[in-house]
Image (cartoon, coloured by chain):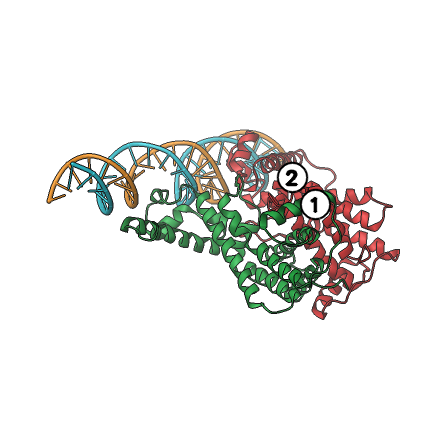
Chain colours: A red, B green, C orange, D cyan
Amino acid sequence: MSAIKGARERARDEVTAAIKEEAGRQLAREGAAKLSLRAVARELGMVSSALYRYFPSRDDLLTALIIDAYDALGEAAETALASAAGGAPAERWTAVCGAVRRWALAHPHEYALIYGSPVPGYQAPQDTVGPAARVGLALIAVLRDAHRTGALHPMAEPPAPVREDARRLADELGVDLPVPALAGFTATWAQLFGLVNFEVFGQFNHVVEAREAFFDQAATGLARQVGLLPRE
Amino acid sequence: MSAIKGARERARDEVTAAIKEEAGRQLAREGAAKLSLRAVARELGMVSSALYRYFPSRDDLLTALIIDAYDALGEAAETALASAAGGAPAERWTAVCGAVRRWALAHPHEYALIYGSPVPGYQAPQDTVGPAARVGLALIAVLRDAHRTGALHPMAEPPAPVREDARRLADELGVDLPVPALAGFTATWAQLFGLVNFEVFGQFNHVVEAREAFFDQAATGLARQVGLLPRE
DNA sequence: CCAAAAAAAAGAGCAGTGCTCTTGTTTTGT
DNA sequence: ACAAAACAAGAGCACTGCTCTTTTTTTTGG
């Protein structure tokens, strides 16, 4: 019932897309803080109040951009995963990590929107959780494949409450992975974004100059930490 | 020459402090995005234009708050370091990590100001680098002490360019630490803030519930990664 | 002590923002 | 053809950062 659309509906979708597109341009150029509804409307040749028929508030427009950013980053990760198919697990892992890093460096404002400070009163709507999970799932896919071929090194048992979280998570995601591995992964996942954050947000300025070599080294360390490489 | 001050100068310092204090309150309550010069002035019973005699722009006021935040977090880290004196190196390490986490959770907006997305055109002034380094230096202090007592496990040699960065850094900081250890530390340092970021910014919602146990486990992992614990 | 100079405060105003409300104008189903 | 729904436009509100100009206060030098 959504396959065929009336002219009205089609026009609406087009305008919505145009708004998102122009907003995305402004976001990429100036960052989320300087994204202005009025400027978007101006650029599109419409009056600002008309824009509210398509996005009820600035936050809603931002949410749309957040979803786009999650999706773009997720796609970059998934593409890297696919391209590295057949390689060793650790190589596939670092390939995905590297893709995340490169996307973040190429789209710093979009990246800041999703992994920087959340906007003040902002509560992530449900629509974002799917796209937001894509990078994590791509990394987990590497673990699953490694586990299936017996290439995943066993990990130490975490404390009970942590195990419980991991068990629940394994259940929700429907992934067949040892509980300690999934618990360890969660921490590693967060740590990966620590590395990317510091580089994108300038915390490595005057500290790390050989950025790529540094990151590759660290990503390999993460692979080891998550059981894709032997300890030592 | 700055010990004795005229009444004028003293009044100026008082007003400056009052502005910073009120701004800090608004920051803690509403976050940096909603911090308004006019609201600060209003609360202080002065007209907004008068405020510009004390802070030439909103960014300058924000910079002052950034420095305060770095200092507060640094002090929390240093206090934890001092309190854990005499303990095992790994315990001192996790004590500092835990202090960073707790401070961040207790002051999310201040934390976001320094470890979230940088404000749009913002370039960190030189005044921030000292305070910004305090947490890192507290962690490095643990490594130094461990190294002095021979408790620091040797690490694998990183690639040459990474070594070069670490060497330069060791030189600048004047710390007597093996180059691989310092290189490894830099990555671990960023990863620590990845963990804190994810928790403070809500990325762990519906993923990790046993937050404290999870973090402690991860921080111990970081201690191992940095050579304060044997591998295994 | 009192006038000149410096500093601070106040006021008005500009250009911009998000958002709402009211008034016209199209387009859509009946 | 017509009522209803969707859309566009305009005016306007309350707010923002910031810059001027004018007034008041404080410090300083003769």
The picture quadrant where one finds residue A7 is top right
Q: Nearer the viewer, residue A194 or B126?
A: B126
Label 1: chain letter? B
Total tally of numbered discs in the picture? 2
Residue B229 in percent (x, y) is at 71, 63
Task: State the residue lying farthest toward the right.
Answer: A149
Q: Which residue lies under the disc numbered 2? A: A107
The C terminus of chain A sits in image quarter: bottom right
Q: Which of pointers 1 and 2 indicates the residue nearer the eye?
A: 1
Q: Is residue B190 left or right of residue A35?
A: right
Q: Is B137 drawn above or below residue A213 in the view shown?
A: below
Secondary structure under the numbered disc 1 in the rendered image? helix
Q: Within 10 Å of the Cα at label 2, are there few (<14), some (14-19), or many (20+) other Cα atoms?
A: some
Q: Nearer the viewer, residue B78 or B100?
A: B78
| Residue A120 seen by the camera | no
Q: Is residue A196 left or right of residue B22?
A: right
Residue drawn at x 68%, y 42% as measured from the top left? A211
Residue A117 in percent (x, y) is at 57, 50
Q: Which residue lies under the disc numbered 1? A: B162
Question: Which three-letter amino acid code belongs to the residue tagged 2?
Answer: His
Residue drawn at x 65%, y 51% as measured from the top left? B186
In the rendering, which numbered label is found on residue A128?
A: none
Q: Is residue A144 left or right of residue A208?
A: right
Residue drawn at x 59%, y 38% as measured from the top left? A27
Secondary structure under the numbered disc 2 in the rendered image? loop
Residue B18 in percent (x, y) is at 37, 53
Label 1 to label 2, Cα distance in Å? 25 Å
| Residue B64 seen by the camera | yes
